Amino acid sequence: MGCQELGIPAGVITGDNVRKLLKYASKQGFAIPAVNCTSSSTINAALEAARDIKAPLIIQFSQGGSAFYAGKGLSNEGQKASIIGAVAAAHHVRLVAKEYGIPVILHSDHCAKKLLPWFDGMLEADEEYFKKHNEPLFSSHMLDLSEEPKHENIATCKKYLERMSKINLLLEMEIGITGGEEDGVDNTGVDNASLYTQPEDIWDVHRELSQVSDMFTIAAAFGNVHGVYKPGNVKLTPHLLKNHQEHVKQKLQCDSDKPILFVFHGGSGSVKDEIKEAVSYGVIKMNVDTDTQWAYWDGIKNYHDSKKGYLQSQVGNPDGVDKPNKKYYDPRVFIREAEKSMIKRVKEACQDLGNVNRL
């Protein structure tokens, strides 16, 4: 059974279709990569990759990526550019995703306390879209209040989930801190103990949020970090996720071995066996950013290296001093090479997560 048999349509999905897809992933033991995108080019590359291997996909935007999408020439005072960029990118995905023939979860990435105006702006856009289309613009949003006291983190998430549940939005929250640095969020100096979520933390989140809705996922910390590092520098402990599941199962007295839908942050550069183990314990979403950034650049770099003699001037190349070079420096040419390299990396992420032929 795949997405089509479950009645999950192509294009951006929301509400019950998001719930069905994530529970299907948990039951079947695979996860969906959440690819951070910053432009229409990176969005299209991610969609093309998933289409080619018949896989659902999560497209997500960070606060900084959203501002970049709107244009670096815009002021981001009050998070205005980030709001505009996120909304513009969301509409782009909605227009093209269905044509790629795959289900797409449209998501916003880490939102710390200081970025809540960005979150609020996206929610307002969701609510306006809901009035016209009976569904939100996005599928889900993430609140990252992991640096705040636990009670404040959970209470704030619960408050937002109450608002989000009225328009069938899913909330992703984080408990425990993902180390490293990404997109202006720097957790390189946090206490090591904060990198490991405790079972009681997971139960506290589940107990409180489930009073509102079952439309939430939890990003638990198990030593994972943003960025990419030399092998051996990152100490992942995926078995902690198993402990969390067992703890919640015991509290709920339920039959499911995976009552929690977990999210894996800091997936770039992780060991494939550890990714596989994490997925076996209920991870249904893994963020991918650093590796796809490198892949995009690598495509441009390799193109430049292979065509260097044709990229030094508008006229004149190894074929002759009067030969034009327009067809080599046309942005559509080298950007496509970036896309092809990124497509390959997104496919690899899907394969690592078991997310192939799931339609």
Image (tube, grey):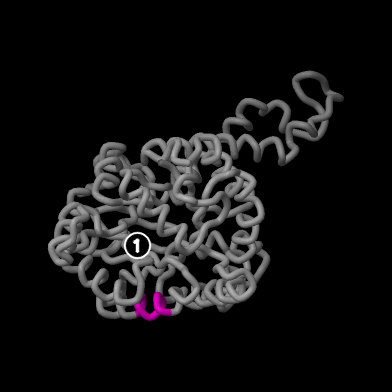
Q: Residue at x 31, y 73 (%)?
A: 209
User: What is the quadrant of residue 100 in the picture?
Assistant: top right
Residue situated in front as seen by the camera: 354 or 27: 27
Residue 155 pos. (x, y %)? 31, 80
Q: Is residue 329 left or right of residue 180?
A: right
| Residue, disc 1 | 217
Q: Residue at x 54, y 72 (%)?
A: 122
Within 10 Å of disc 1 (Cα), the crowding (few <14, some 14-19, many 20+) is many
Residue 304 pos. (x, y %)? 63, 32
Residue 59 visible within the image: yes
Residue situated in front as seen by the camera: 270 or 192: 270
Q: Is residue 181 above or below residue 231?
A: below
Q: Quadrant of the N terminus?
A: top left
Q: Residue at x 40, y 69 (%)?
A: 143
Majority secondary structure in the magenta region: helix
Q: Residue at x 29, y 63 (%)?
A: 177
Q: Is residue 78 above or below residue 301?
A: below
Amino acid type, label 1: Thr
Q: Is residue 160 magenta?
A: yes
Q: Is residue 160 above or below residue 25?
A: below
Q: Is residue 80 left or right of residue 184?
A: right
Residue 281 pos. (x, y %)? 24, 49
Please identify the residue farthest to the top as the structure is shown: 319
Residue situated in front as seen by the camera: 99 or 4: 4
Q: What number of labels is visible?
A: 1
Please identify the residue farthest to the right as the structure is shown: 322
Residue 298 visible within the image: no
Q: Secondary structure at mark 1?
A: strand
Instruction: State the extent of the magenta-drawn residues as a range.
Output: 156-162
